[in-house]
Amino acid sequence: NSHIAVAIDGPAASGKSTVAKTLAKRLGLIMVNTGAMYRAVAWATIQHGVDPSDSAAVVAMLDEVEFSCGVSNNLSTVLVDGVDPGDALRQDAVNSRVSKVAAIPEVRSLLVEMQRDYLKLGSVVMEGRDIGSVVFPNTPFKMYIDASEEVRRKRRAAEGIIDDPTARDKEDSKRKSSPLVVAEGAVKIDSSELGIEEVVDAALEVLRERG
Ligand code: C5P
């Protein structure tokens, strides 16, 4: 079909969610937050008392729990057995589990399929870790948004979130299955010294050049 995918990857707290949201709104595209899907699986392990490091148990859980994705107001939604976990997806217990479940190939293949399905609904701005490398490797619209470690820690602290983004990045970068990488052909944008508008402008420039 003629729908396009804009792939935005980068480490935690790099500012990619804000940029993806702003970009999607400006262009009238569906914004898909893939981190929320991995977080939903991590949240389900808490609900079901499953050890996130026990990949066989997590895989068994995938057969018992229904994960479904949708769109509301042009934003992706994720339901776990029909329930929207809401703000619980941002809780500490989820932060500390999510990289473990995200390293499991079966978890990734289930979610990647759901992510690709969004393109049936319309054009998307999708943000995550492996969108340009694995989910939509053929899209010309790829960006990798980065920021210095110091800036990323500060952004998290300012949000009042207890999270060590760099610890998750290390786990996300060293895993075997679809690690965080700069995808081939992705334009790197360092957001450390830039405001949201400036990053959005840089992203729009990439779309213009490649469109
Ligand atoms: O983007 P966010 O920080 O919410 O992502 C939470 C976690 O989900 C990441 O630390 C990573 O382990 C996982 N993730 C992933 N692949 C994606 C998006 C998120 O592995 N495409």
Image (cartoon, helix red, strand yellow):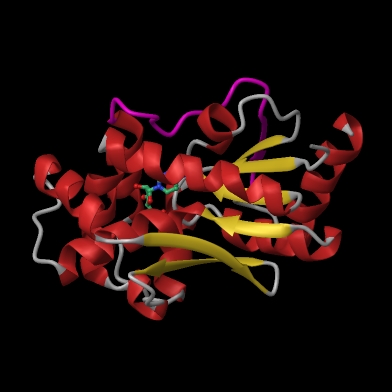
Name the residue nearer the viewer: 166 or 210. 210
Name the residue nearer the viewer: 41 or 14. 41
Position of 79 with respect to 187 (left or right) is left
At x 18%, y 54%, the residue is: 61
Name the residue nearer the viewer: 149 or 91. 91
Residue 113 visible? The answer is yes
At x 69%, y 75%, the residue is: 73
- The residue range painted magenta reads 175-190
Residue 141 occupies which quadrant of the picture?
top right
Give above or below for 120 relative to 132: below
At x 79%, y 45%, the residue is: 202
Secondary structure, magenta segment, majority class: loop
The percent coordinates of residue 123 (x first, y second) are: 76, 49
Position of 91 with respect to 56 (left or right) is right
The percent coordinates of residue 124 (x first, y second) are: 71, 50
**In magenta segment, residue 186:** yes
Name the residue nearer the viewer: 150 or 18. 18
At x 29%, y 29%, the residue is: 174
The percent coordinates of residue 132 (x first, y second) are: 59, 32
The quarter of the rendered structure image containing the N terminus is top right
The quarter of the rendered structure image containing the C terminus is top right
The percent coordinates of residue 119 (x first, y second) are: 68, 46
Residue 146 visible? The answer is no
Residue 144 occupies which quadrant of the picture?
top right
Give the total of numbered labels.
Answer: 0
